Every structure is written in structure tokens, then in C-alpha cells.
Image (cartoon, grey):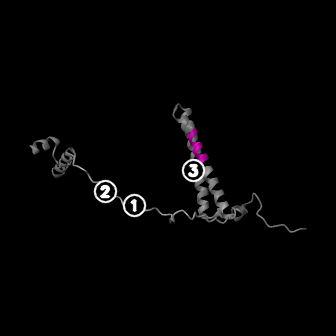
Amino acid sequence: MPLRAITKPAGTLVGMKGLWTPAWLARHLLALVLTAGCLGLGWWQFSRAAGGNSLSWGYMFEWPVFAGFVVFIWIREIQLYRRRDDPAAEPAEEPVAEPVRDLSAPISLGRPVRVAVQPATAAETDPELDAYNDYLAWLAEHPGARPADYRTAKK
């Protein structure tokens, strides 16, 4: 009888060994509770819709979709965990080729260059802006004042 390579049998719990830790058991339980809860809420909305609440018809279809989403995420997380633990499934890393540098191009370090920015200077003053700033300063000095008080105080 020829010797065969020892492999994990498909469809057995051997490949799921890491999914029986306390953290994963909590995740499985959470997924089951959320799925059952969403389906139960869908059934509850169906009973309300059958009783005459027309808005519940939409919710009746929405809750099973939420349950399906929970099952989708649950299965996806299991697959990602199993794929992470299976080194044969990962492709071998290919060496990254060094980019070819053009000798005539300037040398850059790949960092952004900081450029000094000159602050903008006002060429001339704006009388309306000065009056407005004056008004704001007066309001800050007189917190309980009204706009009409400013007009009488300036005269």
C-alpha cells in the first residue's frame, strides 16, 4: 500500500481547530444571537403588518436582510481567519524590482519640499472693514449692548 501525504480531510473539523477558542466561540454565539434576533424581529413585523400596520411591511423585509448580512460577515470572517492560517494558500512574495533612475533627472528624496510662504500684505486699508472691526470691538467691550446703543454711543 503506497504512502499518501497527510492532508487535512475536506469537510472535517480539523481545519476549524482555531475557531474553537473562547474568543471565536463568543463570536459564533454573537452571530447566532444576532441572526435569530433579526429573524425574530422580521416575524414580529410580519405579525404587525398582517394586523393592519402598513409601515411594517417594509420592516418585515428589512430584518431578514440584516440577518443575511450578519451571516455574510460571519462566514467572511471565518474564511479570512482560515486563509490567514493556511500558508499554502498565500502566493510566494516576488522580489520588488528597484526603480530605474534617470541620470539626467534631479535627485529627490521622496519627501515634500517646504516652501516659505510670504504673508499677504494689505495694500490699502478698507474703511468699511475698519468700521466693522470697530463695531465688533465695541460689542466685545459692552456684552449687554444692542446695535442701537452703538449708534448712539458713537455720536
As for residue 68 lying within the magenta part, the answer is yes
Under tag 3, what secondary structure?
helix
Residue tagged 1: 115
Q: Position of residue 120 (x, y in %)?
A: 30, 54
Question: Which region of the structure is painted magenta?
Answer: 61-69
Q: Nearer the viewer, residue 73 or 146?
A: 146
Q: Main secondary structure of the magenta part?
A: helix
Q: Which mark is residue 34?
A: 3
Q: Which three-letter amino acid code belongs to the residue tagged 2?
A: Pro
Closer-to-camera residue (102/89): 102
Q: How far from the left and from the top, in percent, is residue 31?
A: 59, 53
Q: Which mark is residue 119?
A: 2
**Marks 3, 1: nearer the viewer:** 1
In the image, residue 26 above or below residue 125 = below
Assess disc 2: are there few (<14), some (14-19) or many (≥20) residues with their C-alpha within 10 Å of its C-alpha: few
Residue type at numbered disc 3: Leu
Question: Could you say where residue 53 lies in the image, as x and y percent from the top left?
Answer: 51, 32
